[in-house]
Image: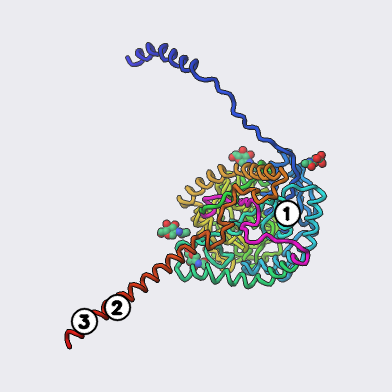
Amino acid sequence: MINKNLIFLLPILVLLLNQVHVNAVDYVPRNIDIEHLSKNILVGSYIGGRSHLKPMLDVATILIERGHNVTLLTSGKYEPSSEYPGLKQITLGPIVTFKNNKRMNIHKDIDYRGLLQLMELTTAVYKINYEKFKHAAKENNIDLFICDALANEPCIDVANNLNKPVVGFTTYMQIMDPKPYKSDPLMGCNISLENESLFERFRCTLIQPLQIAYVFGPFARRLSDIRDQMNIKSVSGKEPKVSLALIDTFFGFELPQSSAPNVQEIGPVLSEGYPPLTPELSDFINGHKRVLYVAFGTRFYTTIENNNKILQSFVEAINNKIIDGVVWALVETSKDNFSPTLGLTDGTQVQTLPILNNEHPHIHITKFAPQFAVLNHTNTKLFFSHGGAGSTHESLYTGTPMLVLPFGGDQMGNAQKLKKSAGIALLLNKHALDVNDILSKIDFLLNDEHIKKNSKRMKYLARINSNRKYKAADLIEYMLYSSGLDEYLDDDFLKEWIPAESRMGFIKANNLDVYGVLLIIIFTLIGIAFKLIKYITNSSSDGKKSKQE
Ligand SMILES: *[C@@H]1O[C@H](CO)[C@@H](O)[C@H](O)[C@H]1NC(C)=O
Ligand SMILES: *[C@@H]1O[C@H](CO)[C@@H](O)[C@H](O)[C@H]1NC(C)=O
Ligand SMILES: *[C@@H]1O[C@H](CO)[C@@H](O)[C@H](O)[C@H]1NC(C)=O
Ligand SMILES: *[C@@H]1O[C@H](CO)[C@@H](O)[C@H](O)[C@H]1NC(C)=O
C-alpha cells in the first residue's frame, strides 16, 4: 500500500525538485586566487640536524612550490636536502656535535645546565655566524628570515638589523609563549603547575627562574658585550623577539593554552611522503603480528648497562609472548655497547653477539630504519622511544602507543605530555631501568583500553592538524606581502597581530597598577575606620568614666 502511494507521488516530487532547480540562482565561483610575488627566503639553524631542519624545510617546500627562492644556512651539510628540490644550501661551518665534546655527558640529566654548553658554543661563534648570515642575506637579496628559535641569535639579530621580517620556528611552546601555570622538567618542574602546592608553585615561578637567570647571566652579558662591540641592536622588551612565532606542536599533545595571533601552533609538521620499508624489514614486520619498534633518535644513546637491560627485556618479552617481534634501529649505539652475555630472570645465559648479528628469529637489528614506514605498519604495536619531538609526532600520527625513555632537553617534557595529556605512553627512568618494570609497562601499553582509545583519538587529531603547515606558509606569505610595500619599516608593520600587552609592559598589561590603587584605597579606608572606631570607643568610655565619677 505504502509503496503504491509513493509511486503515485513520485512524479509530483520530481516536478517539485525540478522547480527548485530551475529557480536556483546560478552561482559563480568565489575568486580564491592569492597574489604570489616571488621572494627570497632564508632558512637558518645553527644546531641543524634532522629534528631542527626537517619541519622548517617541509614548510619551505610549500613556499618553493609557490615560486619563492629558499636558501638554507646551517652547520654542516644537510644530506637529505635532496628530498627538497630547489633548495639552495650554504654551510655555517662544521656540524655541531656534542659527542666529540668530553664535557657533555649524555648519561647525566640534560636540564638547563646542559644547555649551558650550547650557550657557550653559540656565544663563541656569534660574531662569525653573524657575518655569515649577513653575507648570505645580502648575497641572496633575502626578503624574509625563518630562524630556528634555539641557540640561533645571529639569524634573528641579522634579520632585525636589516629590518627584515623574521619568523621564529620551534617545537617548544615555552620558549615563545610562556604561561605562569606551565613549566618544564628542563626547568626542574612539572609541565603543569595546576595541581602543585603553593610551595612548589613558588619554587617554580620565582626560585627556579632566578637560578636559571643567575647561571645564564654571564653568557647573556658576554653576548650583549659582543653585540655592543659590533654595534648590533638587539630587540629587547618585545616577546617574542620575532614578527611571527610558529610552534610545531598541537593541542592534545601540548597542554592547552591561549596565544596571541603572532604565536601560531602549526604542528605536527610532516612530509608529504616518506621512504618505504626495505624488503628485508617488510618481510620481518609482515611475519610478526605484535612488533615493538625501538629507536632513540639520531643523537642519543645510553650506557652499556642500560643497553643490556633493554635487550634482556626484549628477549624476555618475546619468551613470555607479550610481543612477538622487535625492530631496533641502533643509530648511535654500536654493537660493542653491549655485554657479551645476558643473564635472564630464569637463570639462563644468552649470547648477545648472535642477536646483534640478526640470528635471533624475532629480533631485527638495523643501523637505520625508515621510521615513519615502520610505525605506519599495522603490525607495529608499540614504539620504544627517547621522546624527541619528531618521533613523537610520527607516533601520534600513526596511532602508535609509546614507551618513553627520555635522555634530556625537551624529551622529559614531551614524555610527561605523552603520558598525561595525550594518554598514550608510559615513562622509564634512565637512572633506574628495571627489566620487570619494562615488561609490565609493555604489557600494559599493548592491552589497556584507555591507551587504545587515546591512540585512536590522537591519530585523528594529529591528522587534521598536520594540514596546518599550509597555514604556516600562508602566514609567511602574508608577511612577505605586507612587507613588500617597502614602508613596512614603519611601526605599523604587522600591528594587526601584535597584542597591546607586548607594548604595555607587565604591570599595565595586567592592571597591577589599578589593583595597587585599589589596595591603597582599601587600606586608607580601613585606617580611617579604625581611627573612627577608636574615637567612638574612646569618647563613649570617656562618657562612661565621667558618668561613674
Ligand atoms: C629566484 O631565483 C631565480 C633563479 O636564480 C631568479 O631568476 C629570480 O630572480 C629569483 N627571484 C627573486 C625574487 O629574486
Ligand atoms: C610532578 O608530578 C608528579 C606526580 O604527577 C610528582 O610525583 C612530582 O613530585 C612532581 N614534581 C616534579 C618536580 O617532578
Ligand atoms: C588537576 O586536578 C584536576 C582535578 O582533580 C584534574 O581535572 C586535572 O586534570 C589535573 N590537572 C593536571 C595537569 O593533572
Ligand atoms: C602508510 O600506510 C598506508 C596504508 O595504511 C599506505 O597507503 C601508505 O603508503 C603507508 N605509508 C608509508 C610511508 O609507509
Pair 3/1: label in front: 3
Residue interval drawn in magenta: 227-255
Q: Which residue is mark 1?
A: 159
- Rendering coords of residue 64 (x, y %): 73, 41
Front-most of 450 and 20? 20
Q: Residues within 10 Å of mark 1 (few under 14, many from 20)?
A: many
Q: Which residue is rendered at x = 56% and y = 58% of the image?
A: 504
Residue type (three-letter) at the residue carrying disc 1 = Ala
Residue type (three-letter) at the residue carrying disc 2 = Tyr
Front-most of 221 and 147? 221
Q: Which residue is rendered at x = 74% and y = 39% of the image?
A: 38
Q: Secondary structure at mark 1?
A: helix
- Rendering coords of residue 413 (x, y %): 56, 60
Q: Which residue is mark 3?
A: 543
- Rendering coords of residue 533 (x, y %): 29, 75
Q: Which residue is mark 2?
A: 535
Asked whether the residues under the numbered discs 2 and 1 touch, taking CB atoms below 8 Å apart as contact, a structural biologist would say no
Residue type (three-letter) at the residue carrying disc 3 = Gly
